[in-house]
């Protein structure tokens, strides 16, 4: 199946709604098959439903500050790279009314085949996992942000063949510093790199703590090295 056909199917999907989940239907994603980078968030926010643009509002401002520090221009990134989410429809507000509801396991399972088909069709060189839910696609559920932000995982080409959807951490090489990434760069960066980032929402205080800012800066440095190679 082609990517445009998959997009048509995703936009028409009402699976979660039909199963009784309180979503606003209308999948939100952007990008083309030639993208080298796939950025995967948790789920779209409320303004993204009408804008049809991932990371459209406040969280997008912070995310693109990080990406700009890694050398990406926002307009160019949005035009050339691929942006999607673990679940692609707006899940509504959480019970406390502050942030958005975290999509349930059932919704994640409903939407997972779409994500896998996006990955298979695009086969990105770099995958950026933004926020806890996306990070758990690859890392153990008990992994803390401070354990994974500032690291990268390299999957060699043979680990992506014949299945380009590989979230098996044991088949990748976990690089916990810029230096270890650079030693790989000089060797071979063929295959895929996966880099986690925290959720950039203003509702999250995690990125503001000094020790976490240092981890984010390390992640930005890692992204910069990957982008430049
Ligand atoms: S979140 Fe995914 S599975 Fe659920 S209705 Fe939207 S596109 Fe379909």
Image: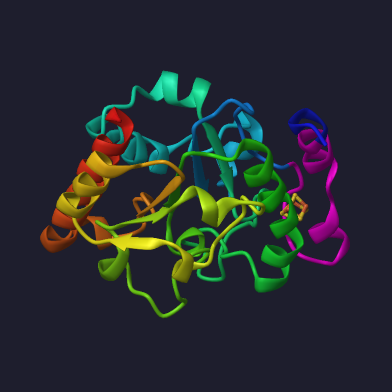
Q: Which residue lies at the image location 43% right of the left edge and 62% below the top edge?
A: 172
> In front: 12, or 46?
12
Q: Give the range drawn in magenta.
A: 6-26
How far across and how far down the image is residue 135, in percent? 45, 62
Q: Is residue 23 magenta?
A: yes
* Residue 75: image location, x then y, percent: 43, 19
Residue 61 image position (x, y, % from top left): 35, 35
Residue appearing at x 66%, y 52% in the figure? 162
Residue 89 can be seen in this image? no
How many marks do you count on the picture? 0
Q: In this view, does 151 lie to the left or right of 8?
A: left
Q: Is residue 10 magenta?
A: yes
Percent of width and height locating residue 95: 56, 70
In the depicted view, which residue is nearer to us: 87 or 224?
224
Could you tell me which residue is drawn at 54 percent across and 29 percent down? Answer: 35
Residue 224, placed above or below residue 177: above
């Amino acid at each position: 199946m082609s990517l445009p056909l998959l997009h048509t199917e995703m936009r028409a999907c009402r699976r979660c709604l039909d199963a009784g989940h309180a979503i606003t239907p209308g999948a939100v994603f952007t990008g083309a098959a030639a993208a080298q980078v796939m950025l995967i968030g948790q789920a779209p926010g409320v303004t993204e439903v009408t804008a049809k643009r991932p990371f459209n509002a406040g969280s997008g401002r912070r995310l693109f500050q990080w990406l700009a520090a890694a050398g990406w221009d926002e307009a160019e990134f949005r035009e050339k790279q691929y942006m999607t989410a673990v679940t692609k429809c707006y899940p509504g507000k959480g019970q406390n009314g502050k942030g958005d509801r975290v999509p349930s396991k059932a919704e994640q399972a409903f939407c997972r085949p779409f994500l896998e088909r996006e990955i298979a069709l695009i086969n990105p060189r770099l995958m950026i996992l933004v926020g806890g839910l996306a990070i758990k696609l690859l890392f153990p559920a008990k992994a803390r942000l401070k354990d994974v932000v500032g690291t990268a995982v390299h999957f060699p080409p043979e680990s992506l063949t014949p299945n380009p959807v590989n979230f098996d951490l044991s088949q990748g090489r976990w690089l916990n510093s810029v230096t270890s990434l650079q030693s790989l760069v000089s060797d071979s960066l063929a295959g895929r790199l996966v880099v986690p980032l925290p959720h950039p929402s203003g509702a999250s205080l995690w990125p503001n703590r000094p020790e976490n800012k240092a981890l984010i800066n390390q992640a930005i440095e890692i992204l910069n090295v990957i982008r430049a190679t």
